[in-house]
Amino acid sequence: MSRKKVRLQYIINQSSRRSTYNKRKSSLLKKVNEISILCGIEACVVVYGENNDEPEVWPPGPGTQNVLHKFRGLSELERNKRTEDLEGYLKKSIEKSQEQLRKQILENKKKRFTNFIDKVLINQHNNTDLVSMNELNDMKDELNDLTKFIDSNINEVEKMLNSMNVEVEEHVGNGIEAMIGIEQQGNSGNAINGGDMQADVHGLNIQNDHQYVPWDNPMLSYHDYNMDTDNL
Amino acid sequence: MSRKKVRLQYIINQSSRRSTYNKRKSSLLKKVNEISILCGIEACVVVYGENNDEPEVWPPGPGTQNVLHKFRGLSELERNKRTEDLEGYLKKSIEKSQEQLRKQILENKKKRFTNFIDKVLINQHNNTDLVSMNELNDMKDELNDLTKFIDSNINEVEKMLNSMNVEVEEHVGNGIEAMIGIEQQGNSGNAINGGDMQADVHGLNIQNDHQYVPWDNPMLSYHDYNMDTDNL
DNA sequence: CACTATCAATAAAA
DNA sequence: TTTTATTGATAGTG
């Protein structure tokens, strides 16, 4: 059976988008109504159309106002707590991207240097000139050019991020928390006492300070997101 | 056939109600997210649980508040109206992290290998033995460690994917079929013949990537990574 | 905008 | 929780 996958991304075709908007908006309002009745809870939804005029809301009338007012009344601390979800999401996205980036970089390096080292070993062993001075210098230059290489990788990553295809069809059973916890002090057997290897490639201590920017246009296709629905 | 129509009324049974609440709430948040992305519009939802404490909202963070402010006519945000939307913000965060990662890796590698290369150069130049066979072998060992490191990383990633990207395919009585599409060009350790250092991590076909964690309803979205980094 | 094959949501059951 | 049986939601289509 073929499965039709719908990409979770902005629908370019205007008529399709409008159609989808109308259909989904209706069911959304309907569902908000249902859950509030079925579960006896308060809930509201606000949906703006493209024209950015009057939003569709549920429940109609003062109902929404009340719920919003309630939400609005939360202390700053409480509301900030909500941002934790976002933060977790962002962190995961970032980690994932970094994972990809890192793997690529390491792959490339591994191949590159392994090859080089092999040459040097053979060179010494045979006392030949497999590895010329030029080659060595090139190697050195190459190391310095690593920056460019990585930069271009980053561009690739960005391009990737720009065209992330998220499929709406996802369904899964177990909600496992998969953390990309790659930690490993991988350096063993280093020799060349040379420089300090302090830069821990593995640690990935990327704790970027998240500053929350006021965004109001939640148009972002996200991939891994965590819905925190524990309480209740 | 008996069909049990679920009537639209308060569910008396507590466990049923709770279950329904969780399931519906999750899908509600998901749908709000979807419509906002698909149609490029602003939307938010606020759902209170029975305990009436912290409401679940979407989008997380300032997103909801901005929508609500807008709804409430508090167009104060009109000005702050972002220079950055969520997407931009996300990208910047990632970029920033990647920048750090890049630097770490770069620094580390540069020190490590530059030092090595220097020795080799001097060695050749003076025909001395600054770089011993042992040292070279150590270097090679290190590179092999790199391989192991990478391999273990790949395992981590696979584990991650296993737990978050499972495509459920329903078949008659067959239970679940999980398809995990990790593809890797695992060639390594090639030698002398240089070869292209292109490592492409691709095919990360993740069903439900993005990452739902501690929630009850693990919905994931995934990205289609296709990082091709051949250059350099 | 009605229709409908498909896929998703979810009430129940285990 | 996880699995199943049904109903519900909807992307396409005319």
Image: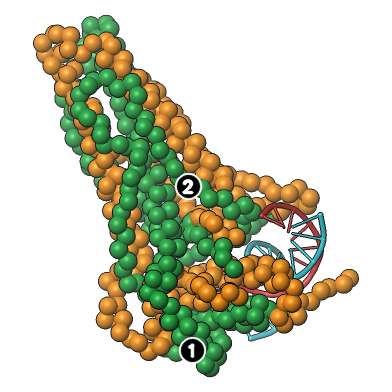
Chain colours: A green, B orange, C cyan, D red
- Above or below, B207 relative to A141: below
Residue B146 coordinates in the image, percent (x, y):
37, 28
Q: How many angstroms separate mark 1 from mark 2 (CA)?
A: 39 Å
- What amino acid does circle 2 point to? Met
- What amino acid does circle 1 point to? Gln
- Above or below, A188 relative to B54: above
| Residue that appears at 13% across and 8% down | B127
In the rendered structure, the answer to whether residue B85 lies left or right of residue B216 reads left
Within 10 Å of the Cα at label 1, are there few (<14), some (14-19), or many (20+) other Cα atoms? Answer: some
| Residue that appears at 33% across and 86% down | B75
In the rendered structure, the answer to whether residue A124 lies left or right of residue B144 reads left
State the residue position of label 2. Answer: A179
Residue B95 coordinates in the image, percent (x, y):
30, 54
Q: Residue furthest left?
A: B126
| Residue that appears at 32% across and 60% down | A210
Q: Residue furthest bottom?
A: A61
Quarter occupied by residue A146: top left
Within 10 Å of the Cα at label 2, are there few (<14), some (14-19), or many (20+) other Cα atoms? Answer: some
State the residue position of label 1. Answer: A65
Residue A30 showing in the rendered view: no
Give the secondary structure at mark 2: loop
- For disc 2, the chain is A
Residue B176 showing in the rendered view: yes
Quarter occupied by residue A103: top left
| Residue that appears at 43% across and 75% down | B64
- Above or below, B178 relative to B187: below
- For disc 1, the chain is A
Q: Quarter of the image containing the C terminus of chain B?
A: top left
* Marks 1 and 2 close (CB-CB < 8 Å): no
Residue A89 coordinates in the image, percent (x, y):
44, 58
